[in-house]
Amino acid sequence: MRNTHMLKLVLGLTSATVFIIFVVIVFFFRKRAAKDEQDDLEANNKHRNGETDIEREDLVTFQGGEDLTICDILDAPGEVIGKSNCGTLYKALLPRSGSVRLLRFLRPVCAARDKEFGDLIELLGYIRHSNLVPLLGFYAGPRGEKLLVHPFYKHGNLAEFIRGGNGESHRWTIIYGISIGIARGLDYLHTGLLKPVIHGNLKSRNILLDRNYQPYISDFGLHLLLNPTAGQELLEASASQGYKAPELIKMKDASEETDIYCYGVILLELLSGKEPINENPTPDEDFYLPNFMRNALLDHRISDLYHPDLLLSKNNSHENPVTEERILKFFQFAMSCCSPSPSLRPSTKQALRKLEEIGK
């Protein structure tokens, strides 16, 4: 009898213990499920608000940047070489590899929404061409900071080359080589991808050079990485430097035709050695050109449109002599790129064909 009572007691305690354990397990899983549901809800809200995992600290590398690390980028001593409303450019020495890179810091307040930003970074990181500056890596910080990593070209940009007193800038072969290199890079952006990539900020300062004067177009698609306000400010800043296509007075978006207009201005810079800025611009329906070019055309002083050193003997060869006629054809081609009517400007394919004709 006593044993039977003891057995009932043990069974009762065991049942109670099992029940308690069961209740604890159920409570735990319900709490975990509630937490998972909350996490999913927060994640969905982030995606609805245009936020993605790009907000956490992350480094994405592309071809040529496989050796980059977050520590390399954040610990690199940097020298400021340029500033704008949307960010800062640094020349940085990466401590581990000893290589010099160009770091572009974008202000979080100026950047496009993260979902759009991530897709565009993937696109720009894919682009490779012998006349385009490649994107090697992209860093996204926990507080919204964004860094783009590019190669550094120590020979500077085209604007510095043109107006830096270097006699090589007056050599026809170099002018021609730079012109056709820019056209090839621009043609790849416009026609070599699934969808055209509009540069939107093409100017001589955004053409980098190597020691052989090979041109590399930089900053292509940068305006796409910015929010509408910052992107518009970038276009207006470029326009104030002499690269404003006439249609941008009414239209706000850059296009393939506005890129060609800017390319024409760069050709005129190469030919003349002068800046494209008007100190006192006057609206005109026929010519959207710097004053010195406008006056030379009206007075029929074509020789004022190119540097006199272009016709010196050092620029000539028996096989391919440089003549005023050839220079005039080059000038006329540049002018066609700067036509007030977008429909009259050549495409990049047509530009390449014309340059090849001039070079024969």
Image (cartoon, helix red, strand yellow):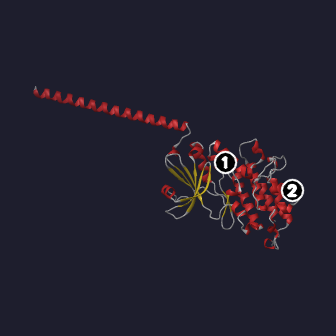
- Say which residue appears at 72% left-offset and 49% top-offset: 240
Element at badge 2?
helix
Element at badge 1?
helix
- Where does residue 251 sit, x and y in percent of width and height? 74, 42
Badge 2 local density, few (<14 within 10 Å), some, or many (20+)?
some
- Where does residue 88 sit, x and y in percent of width and height? 59, 53
Q: Indicate the amino acid at tag 2.
A: Leu
Q: CA distance from mark 2 to mark 1?
A: 31 Å
Residue named by callout 1? 234
Residue 207 left/right relative to 100: right
Q: Indicate the amino acid at tag 1.
A: Leu
Q: Which residue is most to the front?
A: 280
Residue 110 found in image quarter: top right
Residue 303 found in image quarter: bottom right
Tell me, for residue 297, which label it has, or none.
2
Q: Nearer the viewer, residue 40 or 96?
A: 96
- Where does residue 222 sit, x and y in percent of width and height? 64, 50
- Say which residue appears at 72% left-offset and 52% top-offset: 241
Residue 195 appears anywhere in the view: no
